[in-house]
Image: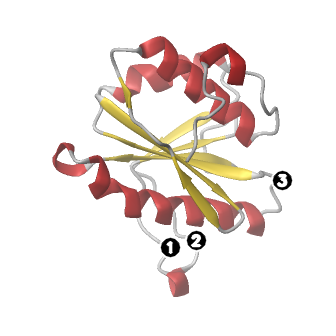
Amino acid sequence: MIIYPIIVELIKYFNRQISLFSGTEFNVDKSKGLTGRCDFIISYSPKQLEITAPVVTIVEAKNDNIKSGLSQCIAEMLAAQLFNQQKNNQIFCIYGIVTTGSNWKFLRLTEDRVDLEAGEHFIGNLESLFGILIYIIKEGVGSRGKYIDNYGISDFWL
């Protein structure tokens, strides 16, 4: 429940041009094991009827352990990437987030490479966290680099 207010503010920031899906079946490719319910998906779509263009997957870490959610998040990112390819969505990269609610770790999938953020972010620094979320959504839909300097994330990735 900690992340809902943050995501709601994000949706408002983007004038409801993005949608949040929670607990939604996301069955992309059974032969690759890319099926199941996602914790959260942010999709570039103003209508919350169905997932149309996923740009961010969010996984709730189990037992307050960020590492425990990394493999699930990567699988969901791969599913989102494949979904976008199948739908001919021109989305360059997919972002993933693993969070305990208090701690947040970001991932990025481009082509066949997953980059893992060097550190973690904390809910106490909400302005920075919100800035990163804005950046990754804009990056996911093609407006690259606008928020890098403003939020100090130019060396964000390993």
Q: Is residue 87 visible?
A: yes
Q: Which residue is tagged 1?
A: 34
- Circles 3 and 1: CB atoms closer than 8 Å: no
Q: Between residues 94 and 20, which one lies in front from this camera angle?
A: 94
Between discs 1 and 2, the one toward the N terminus: 2
Q: Where's residue 65, x and y in %? A: 22, 48
Kindly identify which numbered label has been placed on residue 133.
none
| Mark 3 lies on residue | 90
The reply, left or right, for residue 155 in relation to residue 127 is right
Q: Which mark is residue 28?
A: 2
Judge left or right: residue 24 versus residue 100: right
- Between the C-alphas of marks 3 and 2, the distance is 17 Å
Viewer-nearest residue: 92 or 121: 121
Element on which disc 2 rests? loop
Category of crowding for the residue at label 2, using alpha-carbon neighbours closer than 10 angstroms: few (below 14), some (14–19), many (at least 20) = many
**On screen, 118 above or below 135?**
below
